[in-house]
Amino acid sequence: MTDFRGRRASFRFYQELNDFLPAGQRGRSIDYFFDGNPGIKDPIEALGVPHTEVELIIVNGRSRGFDYQLRDGDRVAVYPVFESLDISPLVKIRSRPLRQVRFIADVHLGKLARYLRLLGFDTLYRNDYRDEEIVRQGVAQRRVILTRDRRLLYNAVITHGYYVRSVVPEEQVAEVVARFDLGGNIHPFHRCLHCNGLIEPVAKSAVLDRLEPLTARYYREFFQCASCGKLYWKGSHYHNLLDKLNRLLEGSVSP
């Protein structure tokens, strides 16, 4: 009998890429029917996996890039980012790794953005960002786009993005730190929680007229955002935040 469904390839997704698949397709081979020779990125996203989540594609035992055109009978294995395995001899999807990890977060991730700033990471966020603006700034400034909308990551111009799995902000920050191996780059309280600007020491005498009497009496060290001018000092709120971050990140944060 003739199969009228066209050509067929077999796809298998590994590890956390299965998060994007229906339950019945996880951890197993998936038949994909197609016409012509589409670029391999198209069927990967048609099956539900954003291209930004993919680090390695193996077709018939050979590593391939997104420019590979799918052929009848291909057997395709798709892998996420490897945290501990060196795959440098193989074809990695992103040829230009980010030397400095910076983020831009979508409107659903305000608390995560605040946590990342608290840890010292350059993170853009506004609650009125449109998707087009997030993509434009993310690509232009080579920022990792963080989102809870996986469809946003289907935009072909995006090279670095991540779909945040958890809906709990405290879990989200630990997830992002682990995903991008940021433990050794944490510098808490170096960025403004409100505007993302850098925080710098400032002489008490220069801001004395802005201090409440009790604050001026009991604290000597002050810090100021170089962008918006917001003042910070190491009061009880500072120590509470530090304790919370230490719990979240299992002791990887230091004052």
Image (tube, rainbow, N blue to C red):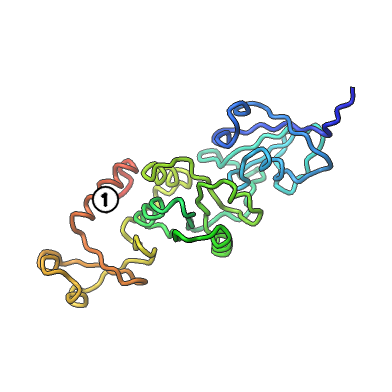
| Relative depth, front residue between 164 and 85 | 164
Circle 1: element type: helix
Residue at 66% x, 43% y is 45
Name the outermost residue toward the right: 1
Image coords of residue 79 (percent x, y): 61, 38
**For this view, does 240 lie left or right of residue 39?**
left
Quadrant where the image shows the N terminus = top right
Image coords of residue 171 (percent x, y): 39, 41
Residue at 18% x, 54% y is 236
Quadrant where the image shows the C terminus = bottom left
| Relative depth, front residue between 36 and 151 | 151
Quarter of the view holding residue 175: top left
| Relative depth, front residue between 143 and 57 | 143
Quarter of the view holding residue 172: top left
Residue that carries the numbered disc 1 in the rendered image: 242
Quarter of the view holding residue 237: bottom left
Characterize the local packing of mark 1: few (<14), some (14-19) or many (20 or more) Cα atoms within 10 angstroms: some
**For this view, does 188 lie left or right of residue 35?**
left
| Relative depth, front residue between 238 and 150 | 150
Image coords of residue 234 (percent x, y): 21, 59
Q: Amino acid at mark 1?
A: Leu
Say if 36 sits above or below 32 in the image: below
